[in-house]
Every structure is written in structure tokens, then in C-alpha cells.
Amino acid sequence: MSETAPSVSQPKDKAREGPQREKINWWHELRGLALMLVGVLAFHSFIAKPFYIPSISMMPSLLVGDRLVVSKYPYGWNWSSLSFHLLPRSTWRVLGSTPQYGDIVIVVPRNRKEDLIKRVVALPGDRIAVIDGRIRLNGKFIKREVEPPVEISADDSLQCDGQSPGHCYDGFGMYRSRLPSGREVYDLPTFRETLPNGATYRVIDYLNQPLDNYPETVVPKGHVFLMGDDRDRSADSRAPFETDFLGHPGGGLGGPVPLSDIGGRAEFITFSLDGTQTWNPLTWWSALRDGRAFKSLRPQIDPAVAGAYEAKQAAAGK
């Protein structure tokens, strides 16, 4: 009885065919992409988000071109916490708390959905006035000392929001100088302010203009008063909604700001570009500013002032 040899052609044919290609499950792929986008949105809304500085209103603390991290949880969450401001404006807050003097915060003006960045200079219940550019808080002028002029590099390629390149520093011409190294800078009149809790920071003040005076106002409960560190070019709580510091449409914050419109606290700078960069990534390295990366944006604290403030708060049972 003869045996038939097994055929070897069938495996060869299968080998030539190669492995079977699996069909792409598009629903699975789209679901994965959607979950990733939701995760990013949730992180930006509840934990932290990046922020870009487009104007000079917070100089010298923040420069045009600074990229920074804003934490979303220090004061709780509200309608403005959600990225892109997708929720309707409201007054609700979850786990809400009040900022401290000197905090740099993100705020959404009540007449438009646009993020601004300013410093907290008065808390609920405070009486605040601005007289000849100086802050008077609860009947007393806050400490303000003259400091050596801050040197701001003359980055002529910078582009501020709403302006063409090269015009960010218009009006600073009289303060421009050339260093022995050949680098050109602006030497701007600088002052150091210290708030009641000891928070201390630098401001620039170089013009006599209407925002140098603001009538005494009591900050309502659930509100704070905000100002920019550039006291002459900041559309802040001193400026009405209708116009900005130059009288242009757009406007400021229109007085004390509800805590429900504050969306987070500025924490630190990640990196800063001087405006010379292009779409070519090879230009980004040379455009980096030295000494800006990972700079903390929390105010310095004067220990002596902070100690006296804490003792006063303890005596008042706060």
C-alpha cells in the first residue's frame, strides 16, 4: 500500500499571501482621540494651563513674550475655569477662597470673554484710593520706595497685542540708552511697593495721566481690586469698561472684580522669547531671553511687615 506524500504547495501559497491585515476600528480610534482631548481640556480647566503675555501692562514683572503657567485651583473653580470660556458667565464657585495681597491672577472682564493678567492690591472690605499714582489702603499710603531704574532690553522685534511689530515700547524713547556692551535698553523709573501682608514687588511709573487718581472705593464682599505693575499702561480696576488707558475701545475692569471672574494664579515663567523668532524652529533658541525660565511669579515677602500683619490678624481673630 503506497502512501501519498503531503503536498507542500499549500503552505507556500499561504506564505506568499503574507499575514492577514486587520481592519482599522475607526470608532475605537476616534474614541481614543476624544478621550485624550477631554483629558487635556480637563487638565487645562482644573489643574493648570499655559499663558502668553501679549502686552506691557505687567512690566517689569512680566514682559511681552513671556510664557508662563497658571494654576487653576488656588481659589477654587468657577465658570471662567473651563478653557475657552465655554460656560455662560455666572457667580457660582466651588471650594472658593480669596487671593492674597500681591498675587498675580487671571481675570475675565465682565463685558467680554478675554483673559487679562493683573495683581491683587486690595481685598474684600478694604478702602482703596489712588492719589498721584500712590495706593492708599484703609486710610494709609502703602510703602513705596524709589529703586534704581529697571533695565528692559530694547527688543525692537516684539509685537504687542493689536500693534504692528516694533511698537510695543512706543513712548519710552526718552528712557532709551546704549550700554558699553552695545546693547540698547530702556531705563524706566522704578518703585518698590509693599502691601500689608509683606508682599513686595516692583512697579514702573513714568507718566502723569488720569489713572494716577482714583476716588476712594470700598471693595465689596466677594471682590478684589486689581492693578497692573506698569501703572501708566494698564487697563485695570481703575479704568472703566468702555475705554482703555489710551481712551481706546476695549476698556479696563471697571472697578473691583468679582472673585467668580478670576480663573487662576500665575505661578512661574516657563520660557521667554524676544520677538526675533520666526516659524523656523532654528530661530527659537537664539530668541530665548536669558534668566527668565522658571522664574517664580509669587511676590517676595518682607518678613518684618508680614510678622506685624499676622499679629494684627490674630488679634482681630481672623
Image (cartoon, rainbow, N blue to C red):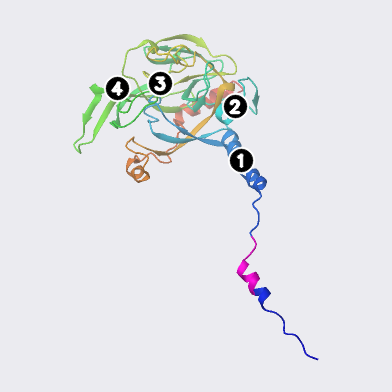
Kindly identify which residue carries mark 2: 86
Question: Mark 2–mark 1 contact, CB under 8 Å?
Answer: no
Say if 187 sits above or below 279 in the image. above
Relative horizontal placement of residue 264, taking residue 276 as reference (left or right): right
The quadrant in which the C terminus is found is top right
Kindly identify which residue carries mark 4: 170
The stretch drawn in magenta includes residue 16 = yes
Compute the Cα span from label 2 to label 1. 16 Å
> Which is more N-terminal, label 2 or label 4?
2
Q: Nearer the viewer, residue 31 or 207?
A: 31
Q: Secondary structure at mark 2?
A: loop
In the image, the segment drawn in magenta is: 12-20
Label 3 CA crowd tier, 10 Å (few <14, some 14–19, many 20+): some
- x then y, percent, for residue 97: 60, 26
- x then y, percent, for residue 121: 47, 21
Tell me the kind of residue under disc 1: Gly
Compute the Cα span from label 3 to label 1. 45 Å
Kindly identify which residue carries mark 3: 143
Q: Secondary structure at mark 1?
A: helix
Query: Where on the picture, by quarter, is residue 43?
Result: top right
Q: Nearer the viewer, residue 129 or 28?
A: 28
- In the displayed image of the protein, which residue is found farthest to the right? 1
> What number is the disc on residue 39?
1
- In the displayed image of the protein, which residue is found farthest to the left? 180
Report the predominant secondary structure element of the magenta stretch: helix
